[in-house]
Amino acid sequence: MDKLNTITSDAIDLLKKMISIPSFSKEENEVANCIEHFLIEKDIETHRLLNNVYAVNSHFDQAKPTIVLNSHHDTVRPVKGYNTDPFTPTLLGDKLIGLGSNDAGGPLVALIAAFIYFYKNETLPFNLCLIASAEEEISGTNGVALLLNDSVFQNKLQGSTIVGGLVGEPTKMEMAVAERGLLVLDAVAHGLAGHAAREEGINAIDVALNDIKNIKELIFEKVSPLTGKSTAKVTVIETENKAHNIVPSICRFIIDVRVNENYTFEEIMLQIQKVVKSELTPRSFRLRSTMIDMTHPIVNAGKKLGWPHYGSPTTSDKALMNFPALKIGPGDSARSHTANEFIHMSEIEAGIKGYIELLEETILQLEQPK
């Protein structure tokens, strides 16, 4: 118990340090240094690729499979409305307030604590690989996807196969077994320029508005019992024309599309294109919907512990992994990206204990005869 108490106390201290360091996406160097130094002080050999920090357990065995423990240390920029300095960790009773405390500092330090708990264990039936990654909030190219495909990282695994992962995000320690994918479409509506006073031309805004109306009315019929329906929302609209007296010939808008596991991105894009005149260009097909098999040992372990499961409407680094992963962590997604972001200290403590119990139960699941 003393060991767990010490690990928990250290994890909370680390979180407070992380909150005090601005770590916006692509600006995570200092917080990565902080995490790296914390691990080194624990006599853990660390490795780094840009702002991604990683480590493996001390008794790494290439003959054993590997489980990845991943969460991110970057944050969005603080929104207006904070009652305290977002970069000053503020403790009010059980509540720790600060930018990134909930998303995803709490889950990250809880995973780090669990990694430390098992770090010197000689009898694990699997290896553990801890990854504190960058650029999750912008789905950047220099985050976990870069690391997983890096030859140096792969050499560190010595040929061991990654068979599963835990992705630390605030889920109230419920198992997010599936999550919707994110498809962002850039749309361009074309008209014909003319003088507004003479009612000349074809207004590209009118074309765009009609398309937006059709998108709003579009129904994707395949509903998932886990992640619900797929949705398409127009979130940005603009014209290049800044003169009040010119009918714009071009109007651009952006469509945020959340795709459940019943559709491919290509199918969704085709359905949208059928109801609009605007040209559609996908920014990326990287963040596809994902689902971990309900019989995976990690999921079975969670079910054995009595934990509920659900489908997540939000997207995470889980979408960039080529192995099955379970999104789970302390905190509440509803607090993410809000003013006065916070996490309860008791949630962090429960998260650390929960991660440890989940991995211990996973061991039992793997030891069961097939």
Image (tube, rainbow, N blue to C red):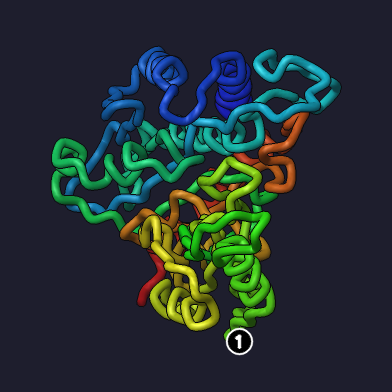
Q: Is residue 326 above or below residue 23?
A: below
**Is 340 positioned to the left or the right of 264 in the image?**
right
Can residue 79 be seen by looking at this rendering?
Answer: yes
Name which quarter of the figure residue 320 lies in.
bottom left
Circle 1 residue: 221
Q: Which of 290 and 345 is in front in this view?
A: 290
The residue closer to the viewer here, 324 or 233, is 233
Location of the C terminus (image quadrant):
bottom left
Q: Residue at x 24, y 52 (%)?
A: 64
The number of discs equals 1
Q: Is mark 1 on a helix, strand or loop?
A: loop
Residue 223 image point, x, y percent:
62, 82
**Quadrant containing the N terminus in the rendered view:** top right
Is 16 above or below relative to 110? above
**Name of the residue lying farthest toward the right:** 93
Name the side, left or right, on which 125 lies relative to 345: left
Instruction: Give the residue at x 36% y 50%.
Output: 67
Closer to us: 197 or 77: 197
Q: Position of residue 175 (x, y in %)?
A: 60, 59
Name the residue at the bottom extreme. 221
Q: Quadrant of residue 255?
A: bottom right
Where does residue 38 sit, x and y in percent of width and height? 44, 16
**Residue placed furthest toward the front:** 198
Residue displayed at 80% across by 27% down: 81
Please provide percent x and percent y for residue 308: 67, 64
Residue 219 falls left or right of residue 34: right
Q: Answer yes or no: is residue 310 visible.
A: no
| Amino acid at dot 1 | Glu
- Dot 1, crowdedness within 10 Å: few (<14), some or many (≥20)? few
Question: Which residue occupies 65% across, 42% down?
Answer: 330
